[in-house]
Amino acid sequence: MSETLLEVQHLKKYFPIQKGLWNKTHGHVKAVDDISFSVHKGETFGLVGESGCGKSTTGRALLRLIEPSEGKVFFEGKEITGLSAEGMRKQRRDMQIVFQDPYSSLDPRHSVQRILEEPLIVHGVTSRKERQQRIERLVEVVGLSRSHLHRYPHQFSGGQRQRIGIARALALQPKLIVADEPVSALDVSIQSQVINLLQDLQSEFGLTYIFIAHDLSVVKHICDRVAVMYLGRIVEIADKEKLYADPQHPYTQALLSAVPEPDPDVKPKRIILQGEVPSPANAPIGCAFNTRCPKVMDVCRTDRPPLRDTGEGHSTACHLYTGAAEVV
Ligand code: SF4
């Protein structure tokens, strides 16, 4: 078994719903609702699901860009959820993020030089010469040139801006990068260039990725293991090959049935889910998927199914697999 880089235990992120003159709390949006998983060194771990399932909130909460409501996150065996602001600032050298939108994630008033230099200054790279060397190396590894350093974000295409975002994430030589929908705002023709760049950088620098996406074709291409999220919960985790060949959870089966089939001789068996995704402010009791599941049983409306180990690193949260042992 490969070494664990990151471990997430029972992570929750609830946002209060406040109303009235006194902002009284009337409930909570359970964006992330008690999830646990671990990420191995050097792998690309996918977090997938429909929009609003909590995957981006998970990425931000585990980096503590937003504070988790409950749960623990361990990085290289050290708990980071209890770190002070200063301790977390130091920890962020190793844990960076690439944001979805290359248009809004870069400050339009700053040149590329300044965007890349800022994290180096903040994290104490005091030698100007060393900073310049690192910046020139960064633009080179992401496929830009030194002549781009004095330009501003609006002077670049979407793909180039995402390369700048990746260069900024790499500036402090992190071990883990959370890539939050890094290609979904880009044209299809540019998406593959950015994906290939991420893969090349992973081989060159031994990076570990958490790759957040809703596009299952992209996830299939880049990820080693995949966790499927629905309404703030993880419903299935497996190696990519196992998940795509043998999806166990009815929600994963429906998601994968919607992926276009490249072979024209294979007739896709599309599973159409009924109804809308419920609000995370009012998730169903029991299994969160019970209002849309074609295999729903009585127990699904009362008992929340735990994640169970169904063998060979495959885990599923569904009452159809009650014989399997619970994942702690
Ligand atoms: Fe469907 Fe029940 Fe399984 Fe939930 S627990 S996915 S409702 S069969």
Image: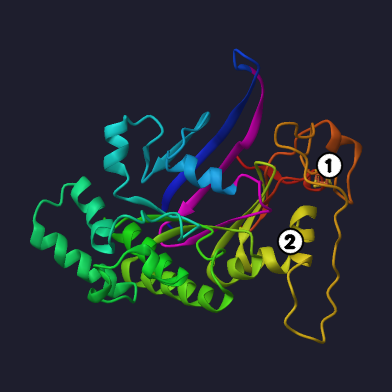
Tell me: 217 left or right of 143.
Answer: right
The image quadrant of residue 89 is top left
Residue at x 74%, y 74% (from the top left corner): 260
Q: Give percent across and percent down for residue 79.
A: 38, 36
Residue at x 54%, y 59% (from the top left corner): 181
Q: Nearer the viewer, residue 326 or 28?
A: 28
| Magenta-colored stretch includes residue 245 | no
Magenta stretch in the rendered image:
25-54
Q: Give percent across and percent down for residue 202.
A: 39, 68
In front of the other: label 2 or label 1? 1
From the image, tell me which residue sits under label 1: 290
Residue that lies at the very extreme toward the bottom in this rendered image: 265
The image quadrant of residue 298 is top right
Residue at x 59%, y 66% (from the top left corner): 219
Ligand 1 under 8 Å from disc 1 Cβ: yes
Q: Are marks 2 and 1 in contact (CB under 8 Å)?
A: no
Does 187 appear above or below 154?
A: below
Find ligand 1 in the image and state its quadrant.
top right
Q: Secondary structure at mark 2?
A: loop
Q: Is residue 264 visible?
A: yes
Tell me: 160 left or right of 109.
Answer: right
Quadrant including the C terminus: top right
Q: Residues within 10 Å of mark 2 (few under 14, many from 20)?
A: many
Q: Give percent across and percent down for residue 259.
A: 73, 69
Amino acid type at mark 2: Pro
Does 223 appear above or below 324?
A: below
From the image, tell me which residue sits under label 2: 247
Looking at marks 2 and 1 on the same chain, the residue that comes earlier in the sequence is marked by 2
Real-space Cα separation, disc 2 to disc 1, in angstroms:
18 Å
Characterize the magenta stretch by its predominant secondary structure: strand
The image quadrant of residue 204 is bottom left
Amino acid type at mark 1: Asn
